[in-house]
Amino acid sequence: MKLHYLSAAAVIAAISLSAIPSCNAFTISTQPASAFTTRLQAAASSDSNYNQPPSPKKYVIIGGGWAGWGAAKALCEGLPYTIPPTEPTDVGNYQFANITLIDALPDPTGATPYLSATGKPVEAGTRGFWKDYPNINKLCAQLGIDEEDVFTPFTNSSFYSPDGLEATAPVFSEATVESILGDVPLVGNVIKNALSGGREKKEEAFPLLPSPLGQVIATIPYFERLPIADRASMVGLLLATVDCLAGDEKVQAAYDRMTAHELFLRFRLSERLVEDFLKPTLLVGLFKPPEELSALVVMELLYYYALAHQDSFDVRWIKKGTVSDSLIQPMAERLVKEEYGQLNVLGGCRVKEVSLEERNDGKMHASKLTYFDTKSGQMETIEDIDGIIMAVGNQGMSSIVGSSPDLAKFPVFSKAASLKGIDVISCRLWFDRKVSTRSPANVFSRFDALRGAGGTFFMLDQLQEDSPELWGDDDATEEGEERGSVVACDFYNAGGLMSLSDEDLVKVLTDELLPSAVTKFADAKLVDSWVGKYPGVVSWFSPGSFDKRPPLEGAGNDVLPNIKCAGDWVRMGEREHGAKGLCQERAYVSGFEAANSLMKSTCEEKFQPHEVLPVREDEAQFKMGMELNKKVMQYLPRFWTR
């Protein structure tokens, strides 16, 4: 039930140059006089047997989201690679790299804040960090950042409809038996006694129970209006989810051809369950209603909600500032200061064409890239390229392939470029007074004013603890003066709202949606507002789209070995990670994997592959369920798929 929100790659792609203050192309280039350089110079001057290191590999990363920076990190840390010396006096050879990261954002390093016209910080989309994000959590440790300084505690999320509060999702990892079951009559007392062994401890932690039992019990009191009978109608869908995730690619392709709505009908989910809970969840989790989504990707989302670990869907948020300045900026600073090799960051640059050439082995090779520099207004070229990682979303892929005839010849790229995106609108509102809410993260459900969109609102003053930076300054307010709430509102599948003016969009929020959900908003006066519109920026997992999504290996090592793809929408094949769907962890990991694959294809395995941490193993009962399903489905036809 936790909110999923915009993926990192989608958000980075979303902020067009016209939507933010103008900024010159941003370039970082470092060539430090490192201990490594000093050693090479000393060896060259004193030893006639010194082996000159080879020319550095030249890699280009297109895209500055989580996938692009994950790829940059893996390449910077994977090269140089020391080739052991063959003679005692030989310092050895070194394989190192010259890496360029290109992005349309003026500053993809996160060092430059994005401001509204009145100087207040803004961000496209509010992004959550789930419990099972081991690689992003490790990044914090590598950067010397305390997670408590970056992230909020795990938080509740609430669903609001025209009827009022519909449901609240608990924080499973921090819940107590009393907080979950204290207000549940009769049944609650029975379950409490069973869980606590008859002990009366109000603060006793709610135990981690086998899924989906833990999720079922823990959410009993949190559905305000949805009857248990409607919730129980989901059982058949959970069985289908086990079947889908246990199946091979052929089985999953059959689910992918179906809409989620078809699957809901065939497994007889109640209409109320779909309309009041599943549809709004999908609109803010996968950004489309069930009739427009592949059943396959919906299964992946439902797995996290009901079949993974009880606390897998616990979510937390950025505690201060934005994702870019809290995590991307310190990572970028670290990478451009690496002792070995060079990282060059080109902001405000748009890739126009990737050119290929045929090599002596008969394989094609990406050798040249042309881009437009908005600072100079000139077309620039990078030649003699050894490898490219395309860390872009559907919109970026369409733009690059559309202007690259060589790439368009490959079906894998032209099909990926044909996928459509989803419209997103981000708003930020500043009020004159505080508005208290049950949860800092919230979902709009079934409001006519949404016009078919999914909607969320976040109380940033609660999440970021009244940080003065929310108002565009670092100075505290005068003694006794209190600033009001700052609310971030996002609309997904927002085609029906895109034609509205910014002023009318703000009125939809302040006059209709917010006061209908939380009545205290009716008394708050709007002080300032910002609206950002981003057409077609988020990947749309439509029915039948699985085969069109780009593979991590691109066109394949047998055909075009030096172009790889990264991003939360790529198919990772054997390297598939436990973090699925549109999420920051998956995008980040895909960057590692794309870089590892590229180095393997171009460095003859003389590199250090980046470590990828797995998520927690599936629970024993889920593994057993999948094995049992495989045996049963050898004899039972899947009459519900096509």
Image: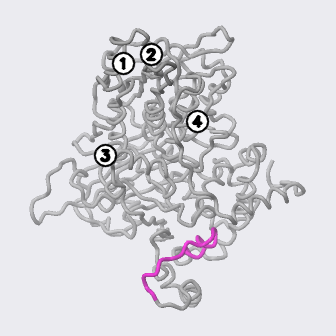
Q: Nearer the viewer, mark 2 or mark 4?
A: 2
> Label 3 amino acid?
Trp
Q: Nearer the viewer, mark 1 or mark 4?
A: 1
Looking at the rendered structure, the secondary structure element under dot 4 is loop
> Label 1 amino acid?
Leu
- Give the CA distance from mark 2 to mark 1: 9 Å
**Location of mark 2 (residue):** 53
- Give the CA distance from mark 2 to mark 4: 46 Å
How would you rate the neighbour count of disc 2 (Cα within 10 Å): few for under 14, some for 14-19, many for 20 or more? some
| Lower sequence index among marks 2 and 4 | 2
Residue 207 x %, y %: 54, 75
Considering depth in this image, is 498 or 293 the residue closer to the camera?
293
- Give the CA distance from mark 1 to mark 4: 51 Å
> Label 4 amino acid?
Lys
Q: Residues in magenta?
A: 201-219
Q: Is residue 25 visible?
A: no
Looking at the rendered structure, the secondary structure element under dot 1 is helix
**Location of mark 4 (residue):** 420
C-beta proximity under 8 Å, tags 4 and 3: no
The furthest residue to the front: 88
C-beta proximity under 8 Å, tags 2 and 1: yes
Looking at the rendered structure, the secondary structure element under dot 3 is strand
